Amino acid sequence: MATYDYDLFVIGGGSGGVRAGRLAGAMGKRVGLAEEYRMGGTCVIRGCVPKKLFVYASQFQEHFDAAAGYGWTVGETTFDWPTLIANKDREITRLEGLYRKGLDNSEVEIFESRAVLIDDHTIEILKTGKRVTADQILIAVGGHPSPHPSLPGNEFCISSNEAFHLDALPKAIVIEGGGYIAVEFANIFHGLGVDTTLVYRGKEILSRFDQDLRHMLHAAMAEKGIHIRCTEIITKVERQEGGRKLVHLSSGDQIIADQVMLAIGRVPNTKSLGLEAVGVDVDDLGAIKVDDYSRTSRENIWAVGDVTNRVQLTPVAIHEAMCFLETVFKNNPTKPDHELIATAVFSQPEIGTVGLTEQDAAQKFKGIDVYRAVFRPMRNTLSGSTEKMLIKLIVDAASRKVVGAHILGPDAGEMAQLLAIPMKAGCTKEDFDRTMAVHPTAAEELVTMYKPSYRIVDGERID
Ligand SMILES: Cc1cc2nc3c(=O)[nH]c(=O)nc-3n(C[C@H](O)[C@H](O)[C@H](O)COP(=O)(O)OP(=O)(O)OC[C@H]3O[C@@H](n4cnc5c(N)ncnc54)[C@H](O)[C@@H]3O)c2cc1C
């Protein structure tokens, strides 16, 4: 039998790679892991975590504004961008250390270098040129923001990566994109006082989300003062003297901004990874093709997380990594389960969603019942805010199972996490109905909407 340096070699120290490496090491496997940038990957270093810290920072102005209605007088407030960046960086460094420590404790050998495949069992550590061998190889290299190569002037634009390290807070920013990253950053910059324009080629922001959520969030963002320009694209970016950018739009309009951020999608990190030479197949977008168990076209090479372009979320990458371990090292073939993934958009107001949109459910089932409540959450009453909250449940009329839940409003992400449990368990609307409400909360609407707002039968709405 061939002997290898490692039982498992992991390329990429992000959400999926670190989890797989750490747990395999803890099982007593000999594990090597290469990371070319910083341990923790996109989520910890330039994704979920710093993004959420920015979201918190951007919410204070609304809290200050709301305070008067509750009797508080808030003195003059100022915001200091360098302080936020420095504190955020300190927290990220702390988390990075924890990830590294976890690997060390599991006796994973870490290579701080880019790694590429040489053959089915050989990996080259580019920094030193050293070649190592492994029985099993896991590719968990993630992706990067699309640089939009066809856009004239794209070299003057930033991506989410740079947004976390800007020297100064821009006075005005144009963000192109309509996905959750573009929408979240539009809210972040607006909340920090930046004149913000969101440009999106589609008819409505956040495609794939429930239409209700999309329209209501759009209206709420516009009400706050975010300029949203749908069915438009940026056609050219020019740099002016002094550094400001002149942004040309397809409508012929021009906007002057200090920063232009592109958030038009992410590209898998599969270039120059040695995949072709080894025979690991990729799709048209460059994502690694895998079977139901995350196995690539090579017997002993596996891929998890964003690089496979299944569902690009941290918990999904981690889940895929855990299933990989079950399959490969625990003799328990396990397919990742991509059904009913709860997700949040940390916009303001926030979105929390689980399961099918009304539109998808209406196509999938013969009949659906829609329970929908739009109301002003209690916290907005004394503050004087007119912002509304949406809570909506989609029920398959035949089985009575709750197949979709969509929330727009404070703490929607937290609610989506909890809702995912009964929905995963297959609870019916009647199970929701016989659950006692927690009063006074916004979430009590979830268990007190007794009558459907409308039904959809064979695609037709019945009020
Ligand atoms: C701005 C932003 C906000 C996000 N917010 C959320 C959120 O709120 N919730 C959520 O669930 N998800 C969020 N995500 C998505 C989440 O970050 C990713 O889904 C997750 O990080 C994917 O994990 P991964 O292990 O597949 O890859 P990554 O975490 O990207 O890790 C891949 C690692 O591989 C390294 N690497 C690449 N090539 C090589 C090589 N050849 N050799 C060595 N190392 C290499 C990279 O440096 C990187 O560290 C966000 C992403 C972004 C960009």
Image (cartoon, rainbow, N blue to C red):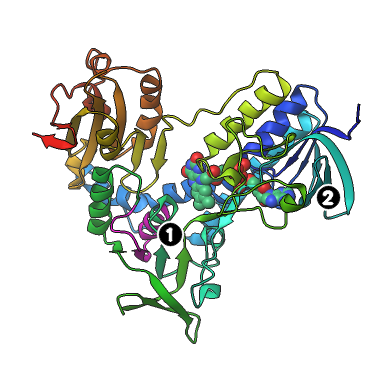
Quadrant into which the C terminus falls: top left
- Ligand 1 under 8 Å from disc 1 Cβ: no
Q: Is residue 321 left or right of residue 449?
A: right
Q: Is residue 72 left or right of residue 3?
A: left
Q: Is residue 195 left or right of residue 377?
A: right
Residue 275, magenta (yes or no): no
- Of tags 2 and 1, which is closer to the observer? 2
Is residue 236 shown above or below 44?
A: below
Q: CA distance from mark 2 to mark 1?
A: 44 Å
User: Label 2, on which residue?
Assistant: 125
How far across and how far down the image is residue 14, in percent? 64, 42
How far across and how far down the image is residue 47, in percent? 54, 49
How far across and how far down the image is residue 306, in percent? 57, 45
Dot 2 amino acid type: Ile
The residue drawn where x is 39% and y is 45% is 346
Is residue 256 shown above or below 274?
A: below
User: Label 1, on which residue?
Assistant: 79
The dot on residue 373 is none
Farthest left residue in view: 463
Element class at badge 2:
strand
Question: Magenta region: which residues?
Answer: 184-205
Sequence order check, earlier mark of 2 and 1: 1
Dot 1 amino acid type: Phe
The residue drawn where x is 43% and y is 59% is 79
Farthest bottom residue in view: 241
How far across and how far down the image is residue 448, in percent? 19, 22
